[in-house]
Image (cartoon, helix red, strand yellow):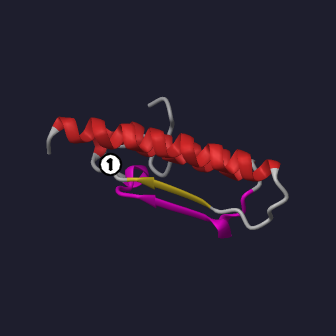
Amino acid sequence: QTPGLDVMSGRFLLVFAFLALFCVLEARASTHTNNWAVIVDTSRYWFNYRHIANALSIYRSVKRLGIPDSHIILMLADDVACNPRNPHPGTVYPSA
């Protein structure tokens, strides 16, 4: 895997996350009741832990804004919560 591609996918995730959060905030200010959030993380492998943690942080923020799970599409490329390297199985911390 090329290191430059990892940086690009991280930047894409960050830009996409801010765009999604902005759209959710904008939608919350309006009278629409059919709001959706799409959160995508394309990074794989343990060394991209921070990308997955960022996507899950955005998911948590969207939930706090009142979007129900039935209107959130969350796509993660890897499962770091169950990775054998994770010292706390089943959990993901944003500052790890």
Residue lying at the far right in this picture: please name it: 31
Residue drawn at (77%, 54%) of the image: 66
Q: Is residue 16 above or below residue 3?
A: below
Is 75 magenta? The answer is yes
Q: Nearer the viewer, residue 85 or 80?
A: 80
The answer to which image quadrant residue 25 occupies is top right
Q: Which residue is mark 1?
A: 43
Is 37 magenta? The answer is no
Mark 1 secondary-structure assignment: loop
Residue drawn at (66%, 64%) of the image: 69
The answer to which image quadrant residue 61 occupies is top right
Using a 10 Å C-alpha cutoff, classify the residue at mark 1 as few (fewer than 14 neighbours), some (14 to 19) or many (20 or more).
Answer: many
Which amino acid is tagged 1?
Ser
Q: In the image, is 93 to the left or to the right of 29?
A: left
Residue 48 x, y percent position in the rendering: 32, 40
Q: Is residue 22 visible?
A: yes
Residue 77 x, y percent position in the rendering: 35, 57
The C terminus lies in quadrant: top left
Residue stretch rendered in magenta on the structure: 67-82
Q: How many marks?
A: 1
Residue 53 x, y percent position in the rendering: 47, 42
The N terminus lies in quadrant: top left
Residue lying at the far left in this picture: please name it: 1
Q: Nearer the viewer, residue 37 or 29?
A: 29
